[in-house]
Image: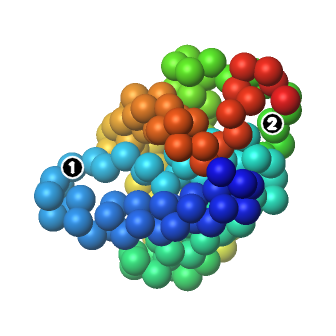
Amino acid sequence: MKTKEAFFVSLLLVFILVILQSTLLYYVIPNAVIPDFALIIVAFCGARRGMQDGQILGFFNGLAEDFMTASFPGFNALIKTLIGFLAGTIKNKMLFDPVIFPSLFIFFVTLLKGVLAAVIAYLFFPEGYFPAVFSSSFLMEIVLNSLFAPLVYLVLKKTHLIPNDIWSGK
């Protein structure tokens, strides 16, 4: 799949996942923690395709989340854009193995999401607004994201949504 086609398919996939995570999965699994599959895709696409693709995917992921949830407008867009950018900084700097690296990478990306949410909420939002960071549900999200990361990575690799030069380090 060509790079532009893969990017637009990734963008469409992120939108679909945000809609599923924000609506359908909450009805199917009430009161449960749902993994952030869109975040996982943004992080992997940024890490394998670079900062620009990571930022754009992250921005549209966050924008869709802002639209679908009751969060402050731009809150998720800023967080996911920063995550896409930071994930893109490791392009061509690391070799990816199929299991350990995806899990560890997404563990730190999800933790970073929580830290960024806390910092942004502290700096820009009224007193009393603080996201549920470092709670038991956030800890569970970190664990679920880390467990699902190798599977999502494998799907992205097999569908050519991320470059197939995984083992070469290019």
Q: Please state which amino acid type lies under the numbered disc 2.
A: Ile
Q: Are marks 2 and 1 in contact (CB under 8 Å)?
A: no
Of the pair 70 and 166, the residue shown nearer to us? 166
Of the pair 120 and 63, the residue shown nearer to us? 63
Residue at 56 percent across and 62 percent down: it is 9
Per the image, label 2 sits on a secondary structure element best described as loop
Residue at 46 percent across and 81 percent down: it is 67
Per the image, label 1 sits on a secondary structure element best described as loop
Quickly name the residue at label 2: 90
Residue at 65 percent across and 51 percent down: it is 1
Task: Look at discs 2 and 1 and give the one toward the viewer.
Answer: 2
Q: Is residue 132 above or below residue 27?
A: above
Quickly name the residue at label 1: 32
Residue 43 disc label: none
- Position of residue 95 in the picture relative to residue 78 (left or right): right
Give residue 150's position: percent from left, percent from top.
48, 28
Regarding residue 79, the answer to whether it shows in the image is no
Figure disc tally = 2
Residue at 81 percent across and 53 percent down: it is 51
